[in-house]
Amino acid sequence: MGRNVSILPGCTIRGEKNIIIGNDVGIGLYAELYASIEEDTGFLEIGDKTTLNSHVMLNADIKGEIRIGKNVLIGPNVVFRASNHSFERRDMIIRQQGHKPGRIIVGDDVWIGANAVIGAGSVVNKDVASYTIVGGVPARPIGKRSFTERDLN
């Protein structure tokens, strides 16, 4: 865990040996952070100056991987799930078919609005180009962030 990390009450953190939290990170009320409790089987990384609002779930358990970049804002009630249930076999109930691990990578300087679902059965199901605004189910580009050199200073 980095310096100056704020974790508000009601948070659940499981698999802490497979979780890295950067500097100046804020984690809101009742957020949930999950990585595997077994070594090298599910990994979660949160970059510097990232803020998770209340009721955010980042679930990298069951061999999943979630990497959140720097300067990311994640709105309330957002869910990331880095693995999905296997369901191909019709002769076996879903509960017995196991899981398929996956990766979710969020770059730097990203805002994910309230109630978004990222991962298994996701709303965002493809890579999104830098500074692109997406919305809908499935997510489609609806705009681009624009800025000038002056905005970067």
Image (spheres, rainbow, N blue to C red):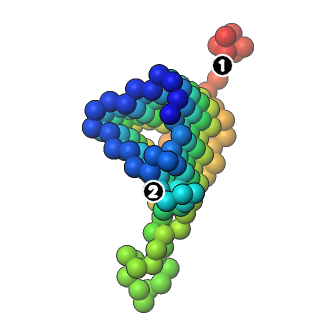
Q: Which mark is residue 1?
A: none
Which residue shows up at 47% across the image and 84% down it? 89
The residue located at (42%, 89%) in the rendering is: 91
Give the residue drawn at x 47%, y 22%: 4
Camera-nearest residue between 83 and 75: 83
Q: Where the C terminus falls, by quadrant?
A: top right
Mark 2, secondary structure of its residue = loop
* Residue underneath mark 2: 37
Spot the residue most to the bottom: 91
Give neighbour class at mark 1: few <14, some 14-19, many 20+ (Cα, 10 Å). few
- Amino acid type of disc 2? Ile
Pointer 1 and pointer 2: residues touching (CB < 8 Å)?
A: no
Q: Position of residue 93 (x, y in %)?
A: 37, 82
Q: Is residue 88 visible?
A: yes
Q: Nearer the viewer, residue 26 or 93?
A: 26
Would you name the residue on which mark 1 appears? 147
Left or right of 31? Residue 19 is: right
**Residue 81 x/y as whole percent:** 46, 54
- The number of callouts visible is 2
Evaluate whether residue 132 shows in this view.
no
Looking at the image, tell me whether mark 1 or mark 2 is earlier in sequence order.
2
Residue 86 location (% of width, % of height): 48, 73
Q: Is residue 131 found left or right of 34 in the rendered image?
A: right
